[in-house]
């Protein structure tokens, strides 16, 4: 239900003028003008801007809450195994 409401709230103009879209347009402009004028630095910056915009999109798309929950779960599992290992080592030392 919340997903539908969020999609309705985002307007078409808001999507078109998003930061990622503006970055990609700027990257394309630099890339095309670099090829047109033969200036290598414009081509370089165009490629870098487009690559950065794609990376930004992928980073924003990732579900960070889920990621950190998974990290906490792995950390607690690791700590539990370490405690069990120390307990076994202590018991083995007592047997000797």
Image (spheres, rainbow, N blue to C red):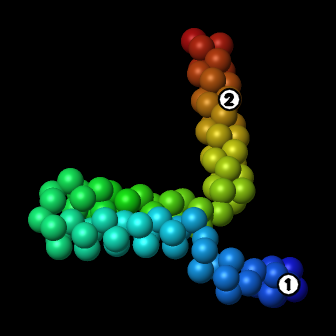
Taking 90 as reference, is 68 above or below it?
below
Q: CA distance from mark 2 to mark 1?
A: 47 Å
Of residues 36 and 23, the one nearer the viewer is 36
Of residues 22 and 48, the one nearer the viewer is 22
Q: Which residue is mark 2?
A: 83
Image quadrant where residue 72 sits: top right
Q: Residues within 10 Å of mark 2 (few under 14, many from 20)?
A: few
Of residues 88 and 47, the one nearer the viewer is 47
On the rendered structure, is 8 left or right of 53?
right
Image quadrant where residue 11 sits: bottom right
Q: Residue furthest front?
A: 37
Q: Quadrant of the N terminus?
A: bottom right
On the rendered structure, is 32 left or right of 36?
right
Q: Residue 48 appears at what percent x and percent y?
A: 32, 57
On the rendered structure, is 78 left or right of 21?
right
Image quadrant where residue 50 sits: bottom left
Tell me, yes or no, if residue 77 can be seen here.
no
**Residue at x-position 65% and y-position 13%:** 94
Q: Quadrant of the C terminus?
A: top right
**Residue at x-position 66% and y-position 34%:** 79
The tally of labels here is 2
First-in-chain label (2 vs 1): 1
Q: Residue furthest left?
A: 38
Q: Residue 78 appears at what percent x and percent y?
A: 62, 39
Q: Residues within 10 Å of mark 1 (few under 14, many from 20)?
A: few
Q: Residue 39 appears at what percent x and percent y?
A: 15, 59
Q: Which residue is mark 1?
A: 5
> Element at badge 2?
helix
Taking 12 as reference, is 88 above or below it?
above
Q: Residue 84 appears at what percent x and percent y?
A: 66, 32
């Amino acid at each position: 239900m919340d997903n539908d409401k969020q999609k309705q709230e985002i307007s078409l103009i808001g999507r078109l003028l998003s930061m990622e879209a503006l970055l990609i347009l700027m990257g394309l402009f630099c890339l095309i003008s670099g090829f047109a004028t033969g200036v290598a630095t414009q081509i370089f910056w165009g490629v870098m801007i487009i690559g950065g915009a794609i990376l930004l999109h992928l980073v924003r798309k990732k579900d960070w809450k889920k990621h950190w929950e998974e990290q906490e779960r792995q950390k607690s599992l690791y700590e539990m195994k370490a405690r069990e290992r120390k307990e076994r080592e202590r018991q083995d030392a007592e047997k000797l």
